[in-house]
Image (cartoon, rainbow, N blue to C red):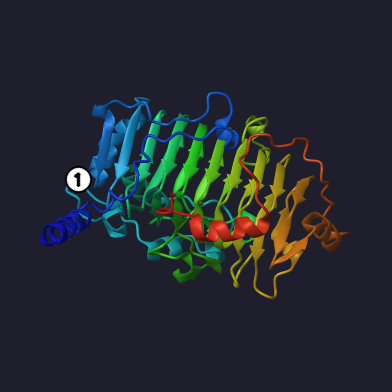
Amino acid sequence: MRIRQITVLAAMLALLSLPAHAESRDISRDTLPANDGWAAEGEGTTGGSAADADHVYTVTSRAELVRALDGGSATPKIIRIAGTVDANTDEDGDHLDCADYATDGYSLKKYLAAYDPRTWGSVKPSGPQEEARQASAKKQAERVELPVGSNTTIVGLKGAVLKGASLQVRNATNVIIRNLDSRDAYDCFPVWQPNTGGLGDWKTAYDNIWLTGATHVWVDHVTLSDKGHPDSAEPTYFARNYLRHDGLLDITNASDLVTVSWSRFADHDKAMLIGSSDSATGDRGKLRVTLHHNEFESVVQRAPRVRFGQVHVYNNRYVVPDDDYRYSLGVSTESGVYAENNAFHTPGHIEVADLVKSWNGSALHQTGTLFDGYPVDLLAIYNAYNSGSERDLTADVGWTPTLHTKIDSAEAADREVARGAGAGRIP
């Protein structure tokens, strides 16, 4: 009996001594399942699953991450991020703040004095302080913009955080990013744009993840936020919010064949832009994107905003913020948004029609929308509410999705996404 007790105790101690991430399976060689959205088209998306042992890295610092990324090379590689990796660090791993990047006499106080619209007017900033801002911004960009090349898989180990970085998948193909908490892509040097929106606005530089000219990309079980420096805590200058963050995940410049699944977008203004601009005709025929089983919590707008693309939006969960909410689904030039079985939770003053915003859009297909627990015809209500102020949207978006996993009811998806979306929640 005593021997049995000793054996059981030894087994328990062995389990307790396992590394924190050993309790989970190794996901680093996973590939996108068949039919799982647009990224499954053709040869599918396999990332760095073919990497040899010499190109499998576990990184714990910015310097190690940069070496593993290899300048965005196309060599098959697997990069496992452990702990917290801060992009705003020097070669010795010491943290850099905004003052460390400022150069050529730049200061925010001087910048505000130089380009105050009451004295500067509405022309684009130029001169010493704008030049100093650009030089300072370049120094930060060299630290925080991290190129991701073709045939790459990036995964976070348990509790992994990538802080202050902008992962940029630029003109690359076959990329997987999974199980990563990416937060606070903080811009130290926003630029004043006097004419934006007729009132002027502050423009920031960095998305947490930016796909530009990228194809066959799978983003899965990531958490994207401004955690650490919320824009709501920033001051107002020139009567406009001094934003420090751009998008959480932007998909632009003819990017194509992308699946974004089981991810969490939280506490942010402009979450996701699909398509570069109304005049970017090179986006036409591209920007085929699937968004499924994602959670958008306290996102003010762009969840997503779409130009040109064929975008399948199904089984997503939206928790609308109480303050400053603009819209969730943005319908823009030549876009084809096919929305199915999405669930929205809203504060009492939000109406069904508020969920959609159109800029030169013509169509929105929607079925199975759940609004605060009640089924609604989102398109019909939007058209009725906006009759006379904006042109009606038709239900014919010109295409029907064929690449997708099982589409659950909005009620079932709402429960599953609340439990399963985001980093650290891969089954």
Q: Is residue 405 above or below residue 243?
A: above
**Relative horizontal placement of residue 325, taking residue 128 as reference (left or right):** right
Q: Residue at x 84, y 52 (%)?
A: 391
- On the image, the x and y values in percent for residue 416 come to 55, 57
Image coordinates for residue 31, horizontal then vertical, percent: 45, 33
Residue 112 position in % (x across, y down): 45, 64
Q: Name the residue nearer the viewer: 112 or 329.
A: 329
Q: Residue furthest front?
A: 1
Q: Please give the residue where the numbered disc 1 appears in the rendered image.
A: 91
Q: For the point 16% across and 48% down, which residue is it?
A: 92
Task: Determine the residue positioned at 47% across, 50% down.
Answer: 126
In the picture shown, does residue 389 fall above or below 274? below
- Helix, strand or loop status at disc 1: loop
- The answer to whether residue 128 is left or right of residue 118 is left
The answer to whether 317 appears left or right of 104 in the picture is right
* Residue type, mark 1 in image: Glu
Q: Is residue 253 visible?
A: no
